[in-house]
Image: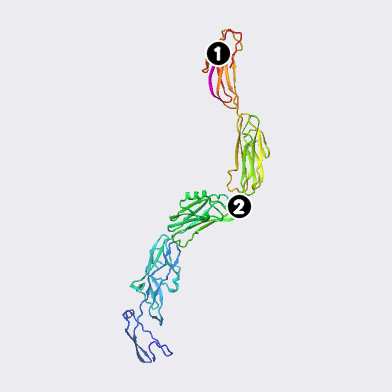
C-alpha cells in the first residue's frame, strides 16, 4: 500500500494481525509488532509499537439503607467501573458486569430472573439494564449483606482489581447493602357513631398495633377529639388514672397517651376514654394517630384512623310517681300521682308511659290511660312530648287492701327518640302503706253457774285484732272474793284475788294467747270473774 498506519483518508487501509492467546499474554507495552503483506507479487513489511489498555476497575460501593420490609428495590448506586483506553478506534466502555458471589440474606434479581449459584457465572449484567438489578431483603434480617462483582470492557478485558475510595486492591469489588430494622405501626378507633349534643360520649377505644417485621421503639399514641368536644375534670381524671403520664393538648381536644418504649411485632396497645360531645349538632369525626422512632420502611398500614360521627339533639323523657298520702286506712281510697316529662333539647316522639300495680287491687281508676286487670299495668300512649314542655300530670286511685299489705307502684316511660343513655330517670317507684293500729281483745269463758264448794275453771284468751303487732301485752284476771284453792297456768302470779300473767312481748295480728284459772266457789249467791 501507499499509506501506512491508521491513515483514514480515501487511500487509507487497515489490516488485522491475529495473535494467539500465548502471544497476547507475552505482549507488553512498547513491544515491536511486525507483519508482512504481499500485494501484486510485492511483499511489504509493517511494524509498530504495541500500546496495551489497562483492565477496567470496578468501584467498591455501599447501597443506601434498605428497610427489611421493602419489596424488590433497585440498587442505588448502580454497579460502576472505569474503562481505560480506546476500543475499536473509539473511547473504551464497560461491556458488562459479572457477580462473583451472592448476598448471605435476601434475593438479587436481574431483568426478572432471580440470581442463584447455578446461573451466577453465566449472567452478564449490561449497563443498559442496571435499572433491573434489584435486591429484596429478608423480613427477619437486620444487618449488612454484600456480594462481589467484576467488570468487563468493550475490548473483552475483565477486571482483576477494585477501587475503594481511590485505593486499588486486587480482587473483585464489594457491593454492600445495609438492611435496617423497620416497623409498621397502625391504629384503629371505634365507639358510638351517634352522640347526643352536650352529653357524655360513651366509651371510645383506640388500638395501636405494630405489624413489624421489627419491634417499634418510642411508639406515640394520640386521639384528637371532634371540634367543640370537651373533657370534664372527671373525664380527664379517669383517663389519667387509667394511663398515667397522659397529657391533654390545647383546649383539651388532643389526648396524648404515654408513649410505649417498645412495641413488639404483632403487639397492640388499647386505650379507652370518654369525653363530652360538642353542643352543636351535625357531622364530625374523631381521629387516632400513631408514630414510632423506628423506620417504617414502606409504611403500608395507615398511621391514623378516623371515625365519622353524627351529633344530634337529645330528648330526655322522665317520670315521677308519689303517693297522695303515705299511709291510708284499710279499705279506704288511696291515690298515686304520676308525671311524664321531657327535659331534653329535642322533642320526644313515640312516648309511652306505664304504671305497674300489684295484681288483685280493687277499684283501680286511672285518670287517663288503659288499665289491664290481668297484668296490673296502666298504659299511656302519649305520642309526643315537646322539649322542655310542662309535665303531663296524671292520677291513679284504688282501694287499700283490707289485709293490711302495702301497695308499691312503678312508673316507666320510653321514647323512640335518641336519649344518649339518659335513662336513669325513665322509671320510678312509690309505696302506700296501710294506717297502722294496735288493738287487743280479751275474752273469758267458763261455767255460768256453779255450787258452793265446787272447783270451777275459766279460760282467758287475749288476741291481737288490730293492723299492727301488739307489744308488751298484759293479761290479768280478777277472781270473786273468798275464792280458795286457786290454780293458774302460764306462770300467773296470785295476789289476793288478782291473777297477773307474764307480759307478752309481741302479739302479731291474728295471734292469741290462752291461759286457765280454777278455784273453789265461795259461799255467795253470785260470782264475778273479770279478765
* Callout in the foreground (1, 2): 1
Mark 1 residue crowding within 10 angstroms, few (<14) / some (14–19) / many (20+): some
The residue carrying mark 1 is 497
Whole-angstrom CA distance, mark 1 to mark 2, is 87 Å
Question: In which quadrant of the rendered view does residue 40 lie?
Answer: bottom left
334 versus 389 height, above or below: above
Residue 326, position as x, y percentages in the image: 61, 34
Asked which secondary structure carries label 2, the reply is: strand
Q: Main secondary structure of the magenta part?
A: strand
Q: Secondary structure at mark 1?
A: loop
Q: Which residues are magenta?
A: 495-507
Q: Which mark is residue 221?
A: none
Q: Is residue 412 visible?
A: no
In the image, residue 327 above or below residue 416: above
- Residue 403 appears in which quarter of the rendering? top right
Q: Residues within 10 Å of mark 2 (few under 14, many from 20)?
A: many
Q: Is residue 199 magenta?
A: no
Q: Position of residue 526 (x, y in %)?
A: 61, 10
Visible in this render: residue 51? yes
- Whether 282 is drawn above or below 440: the answer is below
Where's the N terminus, which quadrant?
bottom left
The residue nearer to you, when weighing 47 against 87, is 87
Colour convention of the picture: rainbow
Identify which residue, 108 or 194, lies in the foreground.
Answer: 194
Q: Earlier in the sequence, mark 1 or mark 2?
A: 2
In the picture, measured across the screen, residue 523 lies left or right of residue 258, that is right
Q: Which residue is mark 2?
A: 312
Figure quadrant of the C terminus:
top right
Residue 294's x, y, as percent?
43, 60
- Residue at x 47%, y 49% (from the top left corner): 241
Amino acid at each position: 500500500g501507499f499509506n501506512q498506519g491508521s491513515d483514514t483518508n480515501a487511500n487509507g487501509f487497515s489490516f488485522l494481525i491475529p495473535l494467539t492467546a500465548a502471544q497476547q499474554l507475552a505482549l507488553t507495552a512498547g513491544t515491536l509488532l511486525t507483519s508482512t503483506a504481499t500485494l501484486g507479487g510485492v511483499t511489504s513489511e509493517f511494524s509498530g509499537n504495541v500500546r496495551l489498555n489497562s483492565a477496567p476497575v470496578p468501584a467498591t460501593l455501599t447501597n443506601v439503607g434498605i428497610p427489611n420490609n421493602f419489596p424488590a428495590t433497585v440498587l442505588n448506586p448502580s454497579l460502576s467501573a472505569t474503562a481505560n483506553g480506546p476500543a475499536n478506534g473509539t473511547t473504551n466502555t464497560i461491556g458488562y458486569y459479572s457477580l462473583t458471589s451472592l448476598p448471605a440474606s435476601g434475593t438479587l434479581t436481574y431483568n426478572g430472573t432471580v440470581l442463584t449459584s447455578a446461573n451466577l457465572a453465566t449472567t452478564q449484567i449490561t449497563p443498559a439494564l442496571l435499572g433491573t438489578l434489584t435486591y429484596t431483603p429478608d423480613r427477619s434480617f437486620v444487618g449488612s449483606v454484600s456480594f462481589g462483582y467484576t467488570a468487563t470492557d468493550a475490548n473483552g478485558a475483565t477486571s482483576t482489581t477494585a477501587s475503594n475510595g481511590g485505593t486499588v486492591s486486587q480482587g473483585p469489588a464489594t457491593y454492600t447493602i445495609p438492611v435496617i430494622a423497620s416497623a409498621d405501626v397502625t391504629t384503629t378507633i371505634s365507639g358510638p357513631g351517634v352522640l347526643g349534643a352536650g352529653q357524655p360520649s360513651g366509651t371510645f377505644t383506640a388500638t395501636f398495633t405494630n405489624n413489624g417485621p421489627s419491634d417499634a421503639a418510642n411508639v406515640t399514641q394520640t386521639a384528637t377529639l371532634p371540634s367543640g368536644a370537651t373533657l370534664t375534670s372527671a373525664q380527664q381524671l379517669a383517663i389519667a388514672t387509667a394511663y398515667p403520664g397522659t397529657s391533654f393538648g390545647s383546649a383539651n381536644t388532643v389526648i396524648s397517651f404515654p408513649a410505649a418504649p417498645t412495641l413488639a411485632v404483632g403487639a397492640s396497645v388499647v386505650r379507652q376514654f370518654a369525653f363530652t360531645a360538642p353542643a352543636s349538632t351535625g357531622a364530625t369525626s374523631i381521629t387516632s394517630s400513631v408514630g414510632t422512632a423506628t423506620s417504617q420502611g414502606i409504611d403500608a398500614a395507615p398511621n391514623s384512623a378516623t371515625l365519622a360521627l353524627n351529633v344530634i339533639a337529645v330528648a330526655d323523657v322522665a317520670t315521677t310517681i308519689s303517693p297522695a298520702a303515705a299511709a291510708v286506712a284499710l279499705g279506704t281510697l288511696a291515690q298515686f300521682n304520676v308525671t311524664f316529662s321531657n327535659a331534653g333539647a329535642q322533642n320526644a316522639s313515640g312516648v309511652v308511659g306505664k304504671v305497674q300495680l300489684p295484681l288483685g287491687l280493687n277499684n283501680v281508676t286511672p285518670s287517663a290511660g288503659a288499665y289491664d286487670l290481668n297484668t296490673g299495668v296502666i298504659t299511656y300512649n302519649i305520642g309526643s312530648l315537646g322539649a322542655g314542655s310542662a309535665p303531663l300530670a296524671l292520677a291513679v286511685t284504688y282501694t287499700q287492701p283490707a289485709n293490711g299489705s302495702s301497695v308499691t307502684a312503678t312508673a316507666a316511660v320510653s321514647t323512640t327518640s335518641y336519649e344518649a343513655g339518659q335513662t336513669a330517670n325513665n322509671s320510678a317507684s312509690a309505696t302506700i302503706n296501710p294506717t297502722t293500729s294496735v288493738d287487743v281483745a280479751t275474752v273469758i269463758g267458763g261455767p255460768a253457774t256453779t255450787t258452793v264448794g265446787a272447783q270451777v275453771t275459766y279460760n282467758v284468751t287475749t288476741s291481737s285484732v288490730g293492723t299492727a303487732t301488739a307489744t308488751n301485752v298484759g293479761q290479768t284476771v280478777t277472781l270473786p272474793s273468798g275464792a280458795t284453792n286457786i290454780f293458774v297456768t302460764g306462770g300467773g302470779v296470785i295476789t289476793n284475788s288478782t291473777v297477773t300473767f307474764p307480759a307478752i312481748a309481741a302479739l302479731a295480728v291474728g295471734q292469741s294467747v290462752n291461759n286457765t284459772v280454777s278455784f273453789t266457789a265461795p259461799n255467795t249467791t253470785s260470782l264475778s270473774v273479770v279478765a
